[in-house]
């Protein structure tokens, strides 16, 4: 898991380079589906998927969970004839998967992060060419991830903007022709308790670690700002509602599992509550801010450890009428 986290790729946006790889696999191997799957403790998550609309599954359903246990390619011509898979819900039921071939994504240190795979709905015998294609493409994927990791290590840590600057940039977005960003307000639920126990400096260290975790797992170009002592905001551009909600919910889970070194012998942890909205066309920034605070308040009230999305829940005018 730590090796996977070092690449800062889990739960990030889809990208054309990785989509091109799965499209190539689908076209050359000839299966209905191809994915680049990354495996964490509880899920398999698709950095790219061609032929299927979902972004991942529980790890217990993942064929790729078997692939990463050994260094070689795993090919299954007929899933119904393999006792490892014939009772799997994706084989015994819809979409009735019948064939699979996957190649591990192996780091230079020998860690297997996931797979590049092809999935068919008919039994098939995979060829040596199929194996060669997947092997070469797995090398390409790891090479891309390695180069990005090294660049990330060289990049200086940027200062987070404050609330006023974040709102000003958001207002520019609303008035521009760019697609409107998804906005998240993230409250560190245990900030006050950590501050009371360890002091404000240690609480700040906790929130900084959580903010760093968020910035390393969201798309390049997203804007992060500290909005108050225990709340920070994220503006995510070029993302649809489903993906924005997926990313934020997975981050909520991941942050809940984090343990942060606060001082020698002392560690801290916290859940987060998240409110999610999207500005309307030409909407005033004050209205956007009120809606974002409202979504966060609902999450905090129902929480801790809750995500409330108010994206696509009517126009800002509808919201104003409901809130009156």
Image (cartoon, rainbow, N blue to C red):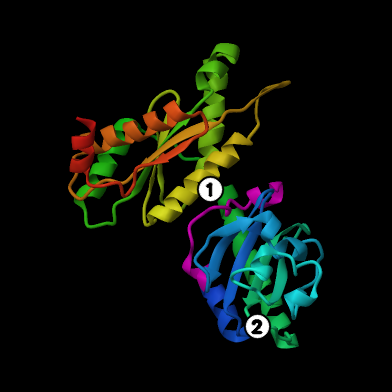
Residue visible at 61% across and 60% down?
145
Please state the extent of the stretch shown in magenta in the rendering. 1-19
In percent of width and height, residue 86 lies at 75, 70
In the image, is residue 7 part of the stretch drawn in magenta? yes
Residue visible at 73% across and 81% down?
131
Q: Which of marks 1 and 2 is nearer the N terminus?
A: 2
Picture disc at residue 244? none
How crowded pointer 2 is (Cα within 10 Å; few <14, some 14-19, many 20+) is rated as some
Q: In which quarter of the image is the C terminus?
A: top left
Residue visible at 17% across and 48% down?
282
Q: Circle 1 sits in a helix, a strand or a loop, which is it? A: helix
Which numbered disc, 1 or 2, marks the residue closer to the eye?
2
Asked if the residues shown at circle 1 and circle 2 are in contact, with their CB atoms under 8 angstroms apart, the answer is no
| Quadrant of the image occupied by residue 59 | bottom right
Q: Can residue 14 be seen in this view?
A: yes
Q: Mark 2 points at which residue?
A: 122
- Residue 33 shown left or right of residue 245 in the figure: right
In percent of width and height, residue 220 lies at 45, 53
In percent of width and height, residue 271 lies at 55, 31
CA–CA distance between discs 1 and 2? 36 Å
How crowded pointer 1 is (Cα within 10 Å; few <14, some 14-19, many 20+) is rated as many
Picture disc at residue 217? 1
**Residue at the outermost front position:** 93
């Amino acid at each position: 898991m730590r090796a996977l986290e070092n690449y800062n790729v889990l739960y990030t946006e889809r990208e054309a380079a990785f989509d091109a790889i799965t499209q190539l696999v689908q076209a050359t191997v000839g299966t209905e589906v191809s994915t680049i799957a990354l495996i964490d403790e509880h899920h398999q998550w698709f950095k790219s998927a061609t032929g299927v609309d979902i972004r991942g599954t529980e790890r217990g359903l993942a064929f790729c969970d078997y692939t990463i246990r050994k260094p070689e390619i795993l090919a299954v011509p007929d899933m119904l004839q393999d006792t490892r898979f014939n009772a799997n819900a994706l084989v015994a039921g819809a979409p009735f998967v019948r064939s699979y071939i996957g190649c591990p994504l192996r780091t230079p240190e020998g860690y297997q992060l996931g797979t590049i795979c092809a999935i068919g709905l008919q039994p098939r015998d995979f060829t040596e060419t199929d194996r060669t294609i997947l092997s070469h493409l797995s090398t390409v994927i790891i090479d891309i991830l390695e180069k990005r990791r090294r660049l990330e290590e060289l990049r200086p840590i940027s200062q987070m903007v404050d609330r006023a600057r974040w709102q000003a940039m958001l207002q520019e977005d609303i008035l521009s022709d760019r697609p409107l960003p998804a906005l998240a307000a993230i409250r560190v639920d245990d900030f006050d308790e950590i501050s009371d126990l360890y002091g404000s400096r240690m609480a700040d260290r906790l929130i900084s670690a959580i903010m760093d975790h968020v910035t390393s797992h969201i798309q390049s170009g997203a804007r992060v700002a500290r909005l108050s002592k225990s709340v920070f905001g994220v503006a995510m551009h070029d993302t649809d509602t489903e993906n924005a909600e997926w990313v934020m919910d997975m981050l909520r889970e991941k942050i809940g599992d984090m343990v942060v070194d606060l001082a020698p012998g002392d560690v801290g942890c916290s859940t987060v509550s998240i409110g999610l909205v999207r500005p309307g066309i030409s909407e005033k920034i004050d209205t956007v801010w009120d809606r974002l605070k409202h979504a966060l308040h609902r999450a905090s009230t129902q929480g801790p450890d809750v995500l409330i999305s108010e994206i696509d829940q009517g126009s800002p005018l509808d919201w104003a009428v409901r809130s009156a």
